[in-house]
Image (spheres, helix red, strand yellow):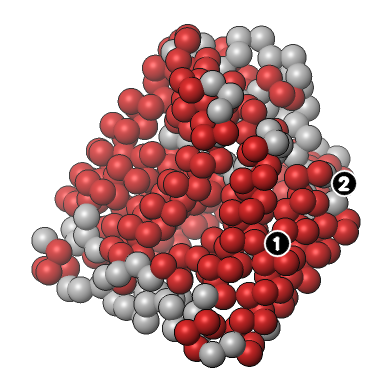
């Protein structure tokens, strides 16, 4: 039933979108999900276990290869490619005088690292940033699963990658996926008392996008609860070193461009208006209410304070996989609890 539902979602995407890459993804993914649903419903157990891999082939591999070969994808891919070339030639990923949406690099400097293969190898399909997004996504999640559960089941990783949201992002250009995977890795290593690994993963994620910065707070709190305050401080020091090394040089090269593209533009205060829109409360408040933007920012700050208070009152102290209440497919590791803190010292 799960794969059948995914097939319906992909078919709807193909029917309603006016974006060519998304329509192609919908058509390819519909077929992959349909075959996976048939295998999961009626095939013998050995073939049934192939369903997640069939879904990955149809929803990720086929559309991703076709789109890369035909130089099609989301705007983010071209932005990262250009930023990688700028990083290589000038030391910073930001154009000094952006005039169009395409000129903006609204990410922190480390995101441009995914554009370095394109800058070095030219317009080769093998240099496309999507391969490197996918590689970091899969490696980070695989290491996180092995860290927490003791092993990484390929079927479980395939299930995660094949679901429509990550599959669409992998095929068309998902800058959020490596960031999210590194955040998961930071939490996994924090749960098992590894401060250096926690700092490296959290710092790398936070050096790519602002949306990863909450992990700089949550992971050390989890590490302090699992091991000690000293370990948490060590993780913070490592993360700060990674952040400084990946961000400060680019800021020094072009401070004005950094402020315009990374601070003002996402807040809607840049010279060019952001096309980002969604039906989420923050956007609706900013768009529909008088003085809505300051109100939305104030609510965001209050939410951050609420999260901080929650962490202080009830710090996280354990990690389980799958999360409590989730179904446990046979290809996934069973629920796991981290060992006592003394075992990871």
Q: Position of residue 156 (x, y in %)?
A: 45, 71
| Label number found at residue 18 | 2
Q: Position of residue 11 (x, y in %)?
A: 81, 65
Q: Specify the quadrant that holds the C terminus.
A: bottom left
> Which residue is pictured at 59% across the width and 54% down the height?
61
Q: In screen coordinates, is 298 left or right of 320? A: right
**How busy is the neighbourhood of tag 2: few (under 14 within 10 Å), some, or many (20 plus)?**
few
Q: Specify the quadrant that holds the N terminus.
A: bottom right
Q: In screen coordinates, is 145 left or right of 327? A: left
| Label number found at residue 95 | none
- Give the number of callouts: 2
Of pointers 2 and 1, the one earlier in the residue sequence: 2
> Which residue is pictured at 75% across the width and 31% down the height?
274
The one of 8 and 242 positioned closer to us in this rendering: 8
Alpha carbon separation for disc pair 2 and 1: 17 Å
> Which residue is pictured at 59% across the width and 61% down the height?
57
Numbered disc 1: secondary structure: helix
Determine whether 124 is above or below 307 in the image: above
The one of 46 and 172 positioned closer to us in this rendering: 46
Determine whether 221 is above or below 134 in the image: below
Q: Residue tagged by mark 1?
A: 29
């Amino acid at each position: 039933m799960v794969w059948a539902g995914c097939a319906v979602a992909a078919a709807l995407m193909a029917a309603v979108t006016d974006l060519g890459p998304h329509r192609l993804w919908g058509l390819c993914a519909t077929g992959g999900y349909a075959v996976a649903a048939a295998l999961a419903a009626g095939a013998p157990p050995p073939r049934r276990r192939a369903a997640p891999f069939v879904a990955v082939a149809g929803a990720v591999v086929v559309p991703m290869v076709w789109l890369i070969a035909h130089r099609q994808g989301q705007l983010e891919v071209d932005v990262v490619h250009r930023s990688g070339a700028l990083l290589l030639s000038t030391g910073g990923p930001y154009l000094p005088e952006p005039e169009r949406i395409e000129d903006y690099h609204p990410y922190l400097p480390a995101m441009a690292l995914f554009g370095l293969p394109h800058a070095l190898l030219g317009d080769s399909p093998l240099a496309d940033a999507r391969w490197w997004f996918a590689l970091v996504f899969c490696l980070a999640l695989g290491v996180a699963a092995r860290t927490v559960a003791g092993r990484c089941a390929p079927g479980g990783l395939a299930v995660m990658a094949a679901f429509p949201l990550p599959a669409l992002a992998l095929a068309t250009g998902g800058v959020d996926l490596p960031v999210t995977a590194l955040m998961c890795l930071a939490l996994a290593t924090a749960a098992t008392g590894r401060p250096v690994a926690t700092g490296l993963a959290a710092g790398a994620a936070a050096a790519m996008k602002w949306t990863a910065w909450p992990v700089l707070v949550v992971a050390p709190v989890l590490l302090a609860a699992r091991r000690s305050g000293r370990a948490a401080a060590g993780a913070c020091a490592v993360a700060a070193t990674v952040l400084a090394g990946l961000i400060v040089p680019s800021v020094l090269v072009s401070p004005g461009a950094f402020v315009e593209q990374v601070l003002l533009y996402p807040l809607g205060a840049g010279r060019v208006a952001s096309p980002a829109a969604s039906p989420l409360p923050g956007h609706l408040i900013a768009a529909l209410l008088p003085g809505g933007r300051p109100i939305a920012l104030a609510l965001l700050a209050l939410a951050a304070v609420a999260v901080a208070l929650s962490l202080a009152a009830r710090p996280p102290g354990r990690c389980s996989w799958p999360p409590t209440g989730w179904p446990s497919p046979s290809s996934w590791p069973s629920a796991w609890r981290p060992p006592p803190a003394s075992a990871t010292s």
